[in-house]
Image (cartoon, rainbow, N blue to C red):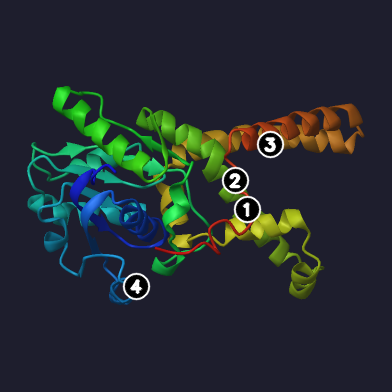
């Protein structure tokens, strides 16, 4: 059995993704020791009670001291302040990464105040549930999922080795790894994740605001489609607030195209253009089948909920 990829890692922020990362690292032996920093005393107390980390601290300097890998798993707009506090305490040669859903400016955020002898490699695991908090995490969250790394453009040999090491780390946790340019990542995620969440938040809000439909009827007669929307709309509101602020350009561009397509669909319904509706529905069904064929569908709606937690 291979040894740990890193001797020590530090996880900054321990919600769903951070706690899943900590659990996965321990389950797969990907690091010798794990330190956790979180701003919330409630979260720190819970992580300590769960016993999933070797060190839980309110001192970010102590958390990152000596760490070979530092992963920021805080809400996106909180990372800048946390990274600035941590930067003077990085050890030489450390890899500095994150798990955020927006990558456009993350390299600059992580590099601010950091010494030249560390490697900034932003990352984003395409994994999650609508749950939040340290109790929501589970070690299998990354199994078969993609992790996108967005290395900086001015790579040298040492940097390339660091990217390879971080890629190997994520693969130890069961993930698949893809390298991508940061701006392209943000456009891809605007289509595949950010816009769907925006639609979900909006449609659930619309249903709740309709005066002629009582809240009890919305709850009682929710069909599968609406239940799926409510699941997505239950995601962490702070994280998604930050995502839409930080990735507004890509989201607005994709939203503009979506609005045009929605208007075309509205016309097809108004004029009874059955052939256009069937063509669209057939094409989108094939996309769904392709997604399942690629293994990017949870096997059950409760994926991970009943699995033993590490």
Q: Nearer the viewer, mark 3 or mark 4?
A: 4
**Pointer 4 local density, CA inside 10 Å: few below 14, some 14–19, many at least 20:** few
Q: Give the residue number, with chain letter if any, for mark 1.
A: 200
- Within 10 Å of disc 1 (Cα), the crowding (few <14, some 14-19, many 20+) is many
Q: In the image, which disc is placed on residue 94?
A: none
Residue 273 visible, this orientation? no
Give the residue at mark 2: 196
Asked whether disc 4 touches disc 2, contact meaning CB atoms under 8 Å apart, the reply is: no
* Residue at x 20%, y 52% (from the top left corner): 83
For label 4, the residue is 50
Vertical order, 80 against 309 (above or below): above
Q: Are marks 2 and 1 in contact (CB under 8 Å)?
A: yes
The answer to which image quadrant residue 52 occupies is bottom left
| Sequence-first disc among 2 and 3 | 2
- Kindly state the secondary structure of the residue where label 3 is placed: helix
Q: Does residue 51 appear in the picture of this structure?
A: yes
Residue position marked by numbered label 3 in the rendering: 288
Q: Is residue 66 left or right of residue 306?
A: left
Q: Nearer the viewer, mark 2 or mark 3?
A: 3
Q: Nearer the viewer, residue 5 or 131?
A: 5
């Amino acid at each position: 059995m291979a040894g740990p990829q890193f001797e020590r890692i530090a996880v900054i922020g321990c919600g769903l993704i951070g706690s899943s990362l900590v659990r996965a690292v321990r389950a797969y032996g990907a690091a010798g020791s794990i330190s956790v920093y979180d701003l919330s005393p409630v979260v720190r107390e819970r992580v300590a009670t769960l016993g999933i980390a070797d060190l839980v601290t309110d001192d970010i300097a102590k958390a990152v001291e000596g760490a070979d890998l530092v992963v920021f798993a805080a809400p996106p707009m909180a990372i800048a302040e946390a990274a600035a506090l941590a930067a003077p305490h990085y050890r030489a040669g450390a890899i500095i990464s994150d798990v955020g859903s927006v990558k456009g400016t993350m390299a600059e955020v992580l590099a601010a105040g950091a010494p030249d002898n560390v490697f900034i490699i932003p990352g984003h695991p395409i994994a999650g549930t609508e749950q939040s908090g340290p109790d929501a995490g589970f070690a299998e969250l990354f199994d078969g999922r993609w992790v996108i790394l967005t290395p900086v453009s001015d790579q040298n040999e040492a940097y390339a080795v660091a990217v390879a090491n971080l890629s190997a780390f994520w693969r130890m946790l069961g993930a698949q790894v893809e390298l991508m340019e940061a701006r392209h990542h943000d456009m891809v995620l605007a289509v595949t994740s950010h816009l769907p969440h925006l639609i979900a938040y909006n449609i659930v809000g619309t249903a709740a605001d309709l005066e002629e439909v009582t809240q009890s009827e919305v709850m009682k007669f929710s069909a599968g489609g609406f239940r799926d929307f409510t699941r997505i709309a239950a995601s962490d509101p702070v994280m998604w607030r930050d995502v839409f602020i930080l990735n507004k350009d890509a989201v607005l561009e994709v939203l503009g195209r979506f609005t045009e397509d929605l208007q075309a669909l509205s016309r097809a319904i108004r004029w009874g253009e059955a052939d256009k509706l069937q063509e669209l529905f057939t094409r989108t069904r094939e996309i769904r089948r392709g997604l399942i064929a690629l293994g990017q569908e949870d096997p059950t709606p409760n994926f991970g909920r009943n699995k033993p937690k590490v």
